[in-house]
Structures are given as structure tokens and as C-alpha cells.
Image (tube, rainbow, N blue to C red):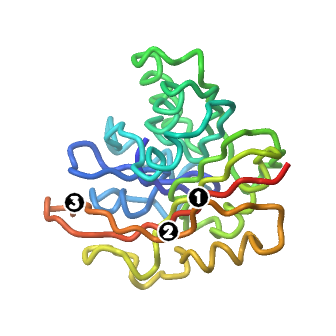
């Protein structure tokens, strides 16, 4: 995938199809760059995200999120969990690298599309698609890699989503969290008045208690990235990036 931001455990960070840059995880920014409607007045996360996906036959570019590629390319493949998988770009990329992937999303519409894309890419046998609302998910420490890309949602506090992601990492495994920096949104973003939805590296480290919990921090930083606006204009955004290894 690419960037996405979902709710209740999904994200949106992939970029809309046809855009120059991508976002996926169900990333708010990616959705709003393309003029998508997040249906925030929906009764629940399923209705909100299914409604968004039904607006268009294809939302995301299908490319993997760039920070995922940068941080995971050198890791030995094993079992991976892709949280907020959207239309499957990240999960498919991971499967192509040799990972056995469990891909979760709250939207059944997104998962149906993702399964088709995996068949077309020839990696359907390496991915298990799972519909899951993260507010009801009981994470177990069983994955060699847990990737949470842009899990920003009006219905799920980011601290809850990243804590659940961390809980799913097996001893010796890797946690990768990527999100929007609250002070690095592009000029056209509609979320400048919602800084609490996003997080700095320092806030992320505090929420995960990286100074006390059994983690070795490999990367904790922010990175500037070029993105395209709703009218095709070029701008920059700032990603918060964490990659950490859980001690055995």
C-alpha cells in the first residue's frame, strides 16, 4: 500500500490513484489530498471506511509506503502484520519480499479489493486478509514484524493503536510505526486544527515507554517527504518514523 489512515485500526496513507506521491495505512492526509470523504458522521468505523472506499473503484496507488520500503528492505523475512492494510499495497510488497503476511483492515470493501490485487500480483497464497476493528482487537505477541502506517483516525486515539501494534510484536521482532508529524502537515491539509490526531517522535516514544519497556530503538526520527496536493501542486509533509526491536 502506500499511506493510509483508518479508524479503529485502519489507516490511510497511500496516495490516491493518479497522484504523484502516495500514502496509505488509511491515512487521513492521503484521503483528503484526493478530496475523499471520510464520513466522520458514520455510526461506526466500518460504515465510515466502507463508505469512503465505495466512492471510487480505486483509492490508493498500489505502491508501498516509502518508509516501509526504507526500513524493512534489509530485514530477514518472517511473519508480518500489516495494520490498516487498505487496498493491499504494503501487504503485497511484503509478500513479494518473502514475508508471510496477515493484513488487517476494518473495511470489508478494501479487503475485497486487496485480495483481488494480491491474486493479480501472484502472492495471494502469502497473505491472509482479516477484517478487524482495532478497538475490539486483542493483540498477541506473535509477529516478526508489525507495521502500522499512518493509523490516524477520528474514532481511535493514536496512543491506543500504537500500543496495540507494539503488543503484537514477538520477542526478537520489529515494530515499525509511521505517522504524520503534527507540525509538518502540507499547506492544503484540513487537519491543522487537529494536531492531537498526530504525533512527534518524542510523543510516540513516551506513549510506548521506549525508555522502560523491552525495546531497542533502531530509528526514531522525522523525515520530510514530497507530496502532491489535490490540484496537483507539490508540497512537503513530515513523517514520524519509529523502528524498534523487542528484546528476546
User: What is the spatial separation of the Cα atoms under label 3 and label 2, in whole angstroms?
Assistant: 19 Å
Residue drawn where x is 83% and y is 67% of the image? 213
- Which mark sits nearer the N-terminus, 3 or 1? 1
How far apart are labels 3 and 1 at the CA level?
Answer: 22 Å
The image shows residue 228 at horizontal and vertical percentages of 22, 60
| Residue located beneath label 1 in the image | 177
Picture coordinates of residue 218 (x, y %)?
A: 62, 60
- The residue carrying mark 3 is 228
Q: CA distance from mark 2 to mark 1?
A: 8 Å
Tell me if label 3 and label 1 are in contact, CB under 8 Å.
no
**In this figure, which residue is indicated by the disc labeled 2?**
240
Q: Are marks 2 and 1 in contact (CB under 8 Å)?
A: yes
Q: Secondary structure at mark 2?
A: strand
The image shows residue 145 at horizontal and vertical percentages of 66, 42
Question: Tag 3: Cα neighbours inside 10 Å, few (<14), some, or many (≥20)?
Answer: many
Element assignment for label 3? strand
Seen at 46% across and 74% down, the residue is 181
Amino acid at each position: 500500500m502506500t499511506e493510509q489512515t483508518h479508524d479503529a485500526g485502519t489507516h490511510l496513507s497511500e496516495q490516491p490513484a493518479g497522484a504523484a506521491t502516495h500514502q496509505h495505512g488509511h491515512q487521513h492526509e492521503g484521503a483528503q489530498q484526493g478530496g475523499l470523504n471520510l464520513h466522520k458522521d458514520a455510526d461506526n468505523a466500518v460504515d465510515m471506511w466502507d463508505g469512503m472506499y465505495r466512492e471510487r473503484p480505486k483509492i490508493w496507488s498500489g505502491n508501498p509506503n516509502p518508509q516501509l520500503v526504507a526500513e524493512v528492505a534489509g530485514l530477514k523475512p518472517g511473519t508480518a502484520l500489516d495494520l490498516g492494510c487498505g487496498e493491499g499495497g504494503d501487504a503485497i510488497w511484503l509478500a513479494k519480499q518473502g514475508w508471510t503476511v496477515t493484513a488487517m483492515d476494518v473495511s470489508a470493501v478494501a479487503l475485497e479489493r486487496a485480495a483481488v490485487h494480491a491474486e493479480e500480483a501472484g502472492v495471494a497464497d502469502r497473505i491472509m486478509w482479516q477484517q478487524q476493528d482495532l478497538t475490539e482487537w486483542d493483540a498477541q505477541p506473535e509477529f516478526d514484524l508489525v507495521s502500522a502506517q499512518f493509523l490516524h483516525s477520528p474514532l481511535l486515539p493514536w496512543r491506543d493503536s500504537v500500543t496495540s501494534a507494539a503488543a503484537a510484536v514477538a520477542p526478537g521482532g520489529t515494530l515499525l510505526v509511521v505517522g504524520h508529524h503534527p507540525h509538518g502537515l502540507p499547506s492544503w491539509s484540513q487537519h491543522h486544527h487537529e494536531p492531537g490526531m498526530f504525533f512527534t517522535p518524542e510523543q510516540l516514544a513516551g506513549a510506548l515507554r521506549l525508555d522502560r519497556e523491552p525495546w531497542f530503538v533502531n530509528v526514531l526520527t522525522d523525515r520530510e517527504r514530497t507530496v502532491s496536493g489535490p490540484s496537483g501542486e507539490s508540497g512537503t509533509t513530515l513523517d514520524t518514523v519509529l523502528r524498534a526491536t523487542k528484546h528476546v
